[in-house]
Image: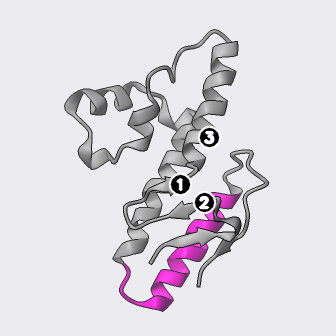
Amino acid sequence: MPSTAVGGSVCVSRGGFIRVSVKDLVRRREHRELQAQGEETLTKTRYLWLKNPLNWTDRQRERFQTLKVDALKVGRAWAIKEAFSDFWDYRYTGSANKFFDRWYFWATVTALAFPDLPEPYVP
């Protein structure tokens, strides 16, 4: 039961894959900002953010732990994506709708500087 945004710019599938990944767009933007300040914090971390944490190697897990995830915008985007994975565990429509409404509110007020994202379309 994939959820697709109007215009098809964002698609969340059961595996948590987000097409035209918002978290990757956030990471790219933040990486450019950090590089302009002379920081290399996000260098060579792209696939770490995109890969399912269950499939991380020990080295990738250690690398993730060294990042100051809470202070990074990409860390917030990653947390939003990870939280959505619980959506697929709901068996009742009412509970799933309540979860989605809370999750969507949290995702939209997080202020990741993407005001142009379309409203979600849930059939």
Mark 1 touching mark 3, by CB under 8 A?
Answer: no
Return the x and y of residue 44 as percentages of the image width and height.
44, 22
Kindly identify which residue carries mark 1: 19
Q: Which residues are magenta?
A: 90-108
| Foreground residue among 5 and 26 | 5
3D distance between C-alphas at marks 1 and 3: 11 Å
Kindly identify which residue carries mark 3: 25
* Residue at position x 73%, y 64% in the image: 118
3D distance between C-alphas at marks 3 and 2: 12 Å
**Picture layout, residue 21 above or below residue 60:** below
Amino acid tagged 2: Val
Quadrant into which the C terminus falls: bottom right
Whichever of labels 3 and 2 marks the residue nearer the N terminus, that label is: 2
Label number found at residue 10 = 2
Q: Is residue 33 left or right of residue 22?
A: right
Q: Residues within 10 Å of mark 1 (few under 14, many from 20)?
A: some
> Considering the numbered disc 1 on the image, is that residue within a helix, a strand or a loop?
strand
**Picture layout, residue 13 above or below residue 18:** below
* Residue at position x 66%, y 32% in the image: 29
